[in-house]
Image (spheres, coloured by chain):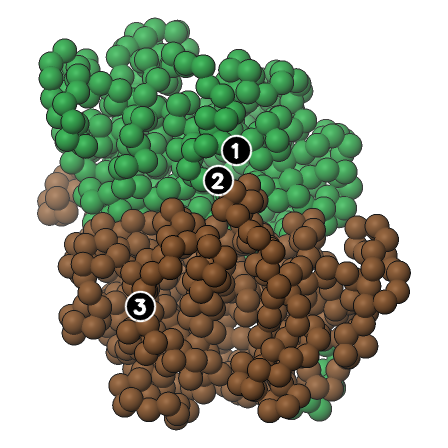
Chain colours: A green, B brown
Amino acid sequence: MSTGTSKTGTTTQVHETSGGTVLREGAFGNARGLVCRECGATQPLGPHYACLECFGPLEIAYDFPEVTREQIEAGPRNIWRYKALLPVPDDIESSPNTEPGFTRLLWAENLGRELGITTLWVKDDSTNPTNSFKDRVVACALSAAVEFGSKVFACPSTGNLANAVAAAGARAGIKTVVFIPSNLEHPKQVNSAIFTDSLVAVEGNYDDVNRLASEIAGEEDGWAFVNVNVRPFYAEGSKTLGYEIAEQLGWRLPDQIVIPVASGSQLTKVDKAFQELIKLGLVEDKPYRVFGAQAEGCGPVATAFKAGVDAIRPVKPDTIAKSLAIGNPADGIYVLDIARRTSGAVEEVDDDAIRDAIVLLARTEGIFTETAGGTTVAVLKKLVETGQLDPDLETVVINTGHGLKTLDAVSGRVAPAATIAPTYDAFAASGIV
Amino acid sequence: MSTGTSKTGTTTQVHETSGGTVLREGAFGNARGLVCRECGATQPLGPHYACLECFGPLEIAYDFPEVTREQIEAGPRNIWRYKALLPVPDDIESSPNTEPGFTRLLWAENLGRELGITTLWVKDDSTNPTNSFKDRVVACALSAAVEFGSKVFACPSTGNLANAVAAAGARAGIKTVVFIPSNLEHPKQVNSAIFTDSLVAVEGNYDDVNRLASEIAGEEDGWAFVNVNVRPFYAEGSKTLGYEIAEQLGWRLPDQIVIPVASGSQLTKVDKAFQELIKLGLVEDKPYRVFGAQAEGCGPVATAFKAGVDAIRPVKPDTIAKSLAIGNPADGIYVLDIARRTSGAVEEVDDDAIRDAIVLLARTEGIFTETAGGTTVAVLKKLVETGQLDPDLETVVINTGHGLKTLDAVSGRVAPAATIAPTYDAFAASGIV
């Protein structure tokens, strides 16, 4: 313990992490350490992601104080209303960030009618600052990077994460370096390059980019790779999706929830959020069923679920749902656990079903989702049709991103109904109405 | 007066408009009639937009009850928290709509530093449901269309409005017909066609499309053209930008505000909102300065302002800021009045300055704006440089839309810094950091 100066200029207590980083007191709020998800071994908070004992994944453990609904409701209209439940300091709102979260939870009466579901809600994360749920996790990673004194804020990404990291870094005034596959679609390149002068195109696929990122994280000091060495802090941001759904339902849990699965992290964190809310007495304890959504072209978790096995066999992705195209999902085994524990399922759909579902969601609810959201809605439809999801139980489906980023997926399906001369006669003859 | 059944199934009082439409009691909340902005003549609420006496533009007049900050703060986190100040029924939240508004007001410390402004805020409407401020006005127009019993919800548009109308109509389950110029950019076409099967491409420019819409509105019964025959209701939605800015500043008005000018409606409605808040005692009365932003390729209001004249000479637009490209702005003369009354100004910038400002806003605040927002930020910069705006007064700049819709404007300016092989050596040799 020594005395230092915090960001806000006040004198506070600080302490060192195992890695020698000097942290100010309260840098991570109510988080008390890192704990291995496999063997339960603990270590101090720091930019670490693998257990020293067994190399298992680390996650954040907390000592939560009493937290009330009223405290949360009095907070800002973004994810920081839940700051007491996140690994962030109490003064997080004064640090420049993109202020994501508290997105719409829309009652989807039309879509429910189409699918035969009595009560259906869409949690719409496409209206986040950079139009995907990644703004939530990146905001938490940014806080960790700042507290660790990182000099570079970085990620490997196929698109949404790149956008979120580059934007958050720009706003926070921290140097960003963003790695993408060199064949990434032009719109996603522009939507990252607009924010950073250090967008790096890598000749290879996402797996190649990811490996390079891990190598750089090992070689360079002071780099915070959001989804590599600060991953435990980053991943906690997804809990806010679960908190918001519960709060927006009037502080109760839904009966069923359908969540896309890429690495599987989001699904496990929504479940963690529900469990925390129950333990803290913020919602009533009740059964809920968790369903995972994958694309057939990258469905290793769905395959394992259907086969009834625990091991996940990696695949080489081949699907239009590129933001879900992780062939070797890090949290896949935990997704299986949760789906089985809650009487849920993990299901998969083909690319045509994904395209159809994008149009279906748009035409029924006025939401233009990307391919990941199309996958989730298509899986929801399949779950009803196959009797795996109870259409009479209250259901939430998560839309994680925006269709403007994956225009090509549907641009062959939708078009003007007619092209006419600018006259009333031409209109009347067009048969439009 | 007769007895009828409202949407929610309860028996309510209804009355007829001058046009014979049967309205339920309270269909337009505290609105009491339509009043001519030119001659002050009044007429009953109905789908009308021109004065019967002088053909001047109509706007909504109200009998406001007492409205408190607490009532507003207890409302939903969207524009309906201000429903008492809008021409919508008290049960508006139960009608399906996109639930726009209550977007971020971000303290723009980095941009302020770049421009030499002490206290600067960005009101970011790019995170609305269809990523522009148009969701606000369309939500109010939709309410009017529903109350008038309209069978078709329609608009002529160059993009943002088309997106908003098609999405809101889909969610509300009302037939939409959306007219666009046939040469509109592909992304904007997809972002409308995804929501409606009646997107109509018109061979001509926006003026041609607009004329056709007016012709159809005159010929067809039961069509609600949001920006034609229900324009008075539609336009009121822009007031919510002003209300939100004041509430998010802690119930006070900024000293200066910079607003883009297309038709000029938004600027006049933000001023109207500020005046209403003062009259209702919701904010303290104080001087504020209103600045309008145009592109040089379509700057008829700026031209008139600088010339010190009252008449606005229409121009043929030629600018990358297509959503501001209205050559004959309907509310231009009122923009002049307000800029002069408040000691503001109307300024214009060229296309290169617009492109530069899009990158500047992204790099400083992590916000990717469209060309209209680029215009507004570029004008803000010019206003400081020319001494027209006081850099020591608190200033708000409005970002009305999303850069993903106008990618081409900047795709030649931003790109990956390097393309490398997927190895650490290649990275180390790249000179990225």
Q: Position of residue B251 (x, y in %)?
A: 40, 49
Name the residue that disc number 2 marks.
A102
Crowd around label 1: few <14 · some 14–19 · many ≥20 (10 Å): many
Relative depth, front residue between A191 and A200: A191
| SS of the residue under disc 2 | loop
Where B320 sits versus A428, above or below? above
Name the residue that disc number 3 marks.
B289
How far apart are the alpha carbons under marks 2 and 3? 32 Å
x 85%, y 67%: residue: B1
Relative depth, front residue between A139 and B398: B398
Q: Amino acid at mark 2?
A: Phe
* Same subunit: marks 3 and 1: no
Asked whether disc 3 touches disc 1, contact meaning CB atoms under 8 Å apart, the reply is: no
Tell us which disc is closer to us: 2 or 3.
3
x 51%, y 15%: residue: A280
* Same subunit: marks 1 and 2: yes
Which image quadrant for residue A216? top left
Where A149 sits versus B114, above or below? above
Q: Amino acid at mark 1?
A: Glu
Q: Earlier in the sequence, mark 1 or mark 2?
A: 2
Q: Position of residue A288 (x, y in %)?
A: 65, 22
Name the residue that disc number 1 marks.
A244
Crowd around label 2: few <14 · some 14–19 · many ≥20 (10 Å): many
How far apart are the alpha carbons under marks 1 and 2? 6 Å
Label placed on residue B76:
none
Q: Amino acid at mark 3?
A: Arg
